[in-house]
Image: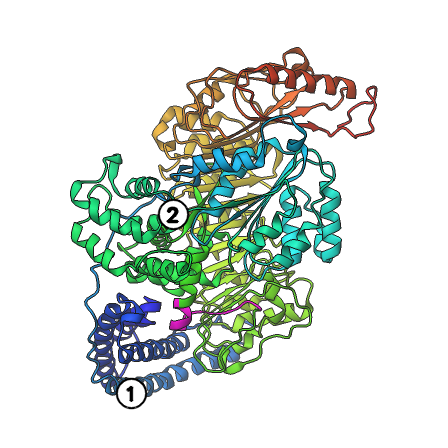
Amino acid sequence: MDIVTGAIAKLIPKLADLLVGEYKLHKNVKKNIKDLLKELESMNVALVKIGEVPRDQLDKQDKLWADDVRELSYVIEDVVDKFLVRVDHIQPDDATNKFKGLMKRTTKLLKKVKDKYGIAHAIKDIQEQLQKVAARRDRNKVVVPNPTEPITIDPCLRALYAEATELVGIYGKRDEELMRLLSMAGDDASTKRLKKVSIVGFGGLGKTTLARAVYDKIKGDFDCRAFVPVGQNPDMKKVLRDILIDLGNPHSDLAMLDDKQLVKKLHDFLENKRYLVIIDDIWDEKLWEHINFAFSNRNNVGSRLITTTRIVSVSNSCCSSDHDSVYQMEPLSVDDSRRLFYKRIFPFESGCPNEFEQVSTDILKKCGGVPLAIITIASALAGGQKVKPKCEWDVLLQSLGSGLTEDNSLEEMRRILSFSYYNLPSHLKTCLLYLCIYPEDSTIDRDGLIWKWVAEGFVHHGDQGTSLFLVGLNYFNQLINRSMIQPIYDGIGQVYACRVHDMVLDLIRNLSHEAKFVNVLDGTGNSISSQSNVRRLSLQNKKEDHQAKPLTNIMSMSRVRSITIFPPAVSIMPSLSMFEVLRVLDLSDCNLGESSSLQLNLKGVGHLIHLRYLDLSGTKIRELSAEIGNLQFLEVLDLGDNYQLDGLPSTICNLRRLIYLNIFHGKLVPTPGVLQNLTSIEVLRGILVSLNIIALELGNLTRLRELKVYFKDGSFDLYEGFVKSLCNLHHIEILSIDCNSGETSFELMDLLGERWVPPVHLRKFVSEMPSQLSALRGWIKRDPSHLSNLSVLFLDSVKEVQQEDVEIIGGLLSLHRLHIKSTHQTQRLLVIRADGFRCMVDFYLNCGSAAQIMFEPGALLRAEVVRFSLGVRVAKEDGNCGFDLGLQVWMYCGGARVGEAKEAEAAVRHALKAHPNHPRIYIDMWPRIAEDAHDDDLCED
């Protein structure tokens, strides 16, 4: 793929299409294209071989030849793409001027003829350049060392990366040493003082993992908590803002405050609060000294502050008082290293066969007890149900360095990680290196990353008709399986994002720099090369600079294919008119709404005719030019979280190649006949369905996997047309319906229950409309297997929840997250049985102030979050509702006196205190009781 073979892998099918397409090329041109195709196929094989060998083992001549061919492949693809755009790009005729329309069509025909000759000259010129490159490389004969055969593992659809709490050695360190330093137990005065602990050790030892494990264990014992990564070259204001937001102080004015004001605000906010704050990966003593002003030593309520760093002097600076402690992170012991290594490789914990014991010992010695190195190497050797042949272990051992020590840890860690990198298939190498466009410590959204891979051409079809996104998802999971990226889980145990370890990021940035794959501007003094070989730009200045000027190097920009801009760097956003072949443009969360110049700059987006990916989500734009319809190759368009948009141009529906379209809350109101153009669409969010013909046209979008629709004014015919269309969408995995049509919404839910059979792929169903549970009962009673994969059920305005509903829903074996809110509850007692909701992780049941929720012993054993409503008077009558877990309770006190509300809260807390499991509880009173309220005051709704 790209980093290994340049653009050749994508070029080969494009050139093949030129030969079989309806372009009527001259036979000599076709012959030249065939010759070029054969030459590129041969070069592709050679480049793949080169890509499997570490660059430090390659002959210099081979390196130069590979770089030349990769660079030339980009030029060839640009030539071919420009030809295809000119020939295939068809704009709608001007119906108001027939003569003008005729002139347009005539001009297009003339351009086609001209382009045929243009492509002929271009192909001939390309062949001449290839001959020059070949001559420099001794007629293209590449001799490279014999690389190790690729070590493959079975494709995974579920990440196998070990979670932090499962890592060998973590429990002992956390409970026996670090917890002792934090002194969480006991009642003496020392436990009440603010205590700071700094975890120090070199990269890969697991400092962040250990800090996270401690944080997850004790965070419930504090009033507020925060876990904030810092990293190298941080923006002080952003760090302070992140701490405040994480602690629960997300005020909109934070962006307007300077450093000193933020420190004071943080200091004031923490006064008399028992807080837990972890500041991860500090590199600078001065940065810590500045932050430390916010954490007053006068806090004597048992607060704890934990820092992590690789630098001893920084850790000493973090722990300046006598009752603070430095925790020196040590490598894993030999026994712990061996257990971690074997757990990752050998199935069913069968242990290590005798023939592998010595080579295992030698490999582990080189890993030096560093968890990151052990997991990475073990992942390269993991063979699923079968153990890799010993010969592959021997080859790996010979490839590793002399062993990890503190003196050469970075170099040797790179060598270890490099082995795993070169062990990847070529397409995964490209996908991994692409992650260097993200700043350090980023939480990288899984779906957004995969769609970028698709737009860049890194993802190729497997089976005919397979969704490119699903193929990319498999790539993503394989990178997790090989421990090259770290998964981030949501509340129900599903991977929604990933993180790149600092050491892995260091590796891929170096590799990317050598291969000229990505040019990163992060405000540390680097700059764009004046040469014309910049292909991908990542602008990620960490510090806001309002005096910065936009980039203006036209020569460097003309061949850029991808640009990703992170919010602080939006001020240097170059003019879009500078880009000629741009395929990916990501401006997500960059505030374009406050700058008229940036808004004006964005108007040029319609000229980016090669664009495949456009992300403008969260940019606060107010309008979108109708020229968006010119982007005939656009595959991904994300306009989410832009509530300022008054509406969207209907030309969006001219984008026939769209696969993903995300729009804020019904901002797209399609006109009849336009939806039928979107036949490639797989994800469609935010469409307003207002006409019956639009509802029926949805049925033509047969590739849809996710659909989010809105109904403003509904009728029976409209709902009937929608349900009819829904019956044609057999690949739906996520369905979300929002209807503000009052009582008519019940008709839609009834129709769904009577006429729609959910496909077995359905994973998530969201209904934000007044409805009854009769439809759900019908689906489950008719054939429960159709909901066998349903993991998320969200029903926001259910008329009433009956005990029968609770038991039916509780029988859904894959259900992990449940959100039900009823509006007219009549049945007072609802019992959550011990044999229901077996996989439930996040449970929400809000039946207002009239209902009483009872939990049988053993109910919701796997639940991590349980939230339910409890009326004041119900709580007073029976404060002990059978709680046997950690809970969050919404207590409705509208109409009750403040004294009654306080009595009810005390009754619940007393019952929980007496419970043998001592569950943690968070009680939210609604409406909230003012601090100065008197017992005789009423709690008004």
Q: Is residue 523 above or below residue 338?
A: below
What kind of residue is marked 2? Pro
At mark 1, the secondary structure is helix
Specify which label sits upstream in the sequence, 1 or 2.
Answer: 1
Where on the picture, by quarter, is residue 233?
bottom right
**Residue 507 is one of the magenta-drawn residues:** no
567 sits to left or right of 717: right
683 sits to left or right of 129: right
Where on the picture, by quarter, is residue 596?
bottom right
Which one is in front, 405 or 432?
405
What kind of residue is marked 1? Lys
Q: Are marks 1 and 2 in contact (CB under 8 Å)?
A: no
* Marks 1/2: CA–CA distance: 54 Å
Magenta stretch, residue numbers: 511-523
Q: Position of residue 592 (x, y in %)?
A: 64, 63
Q: Is residue 820 visible?
A: yes
Q: Is residue 768 above or below residue 872?
A: below
| Badge 2 density bin: few <14, some 14–19, many ≥20, Cα 10 Å | many
Which one is in front, 532 or 162?
162
Disc number placed over residue 124 in the picture, else none: 1
Q: Residue at x 42, y 60 (%)?
A: 407
Disc number placed over residue 371 in the picture, else none: 2
Which one is in front, 286 or 29?
286
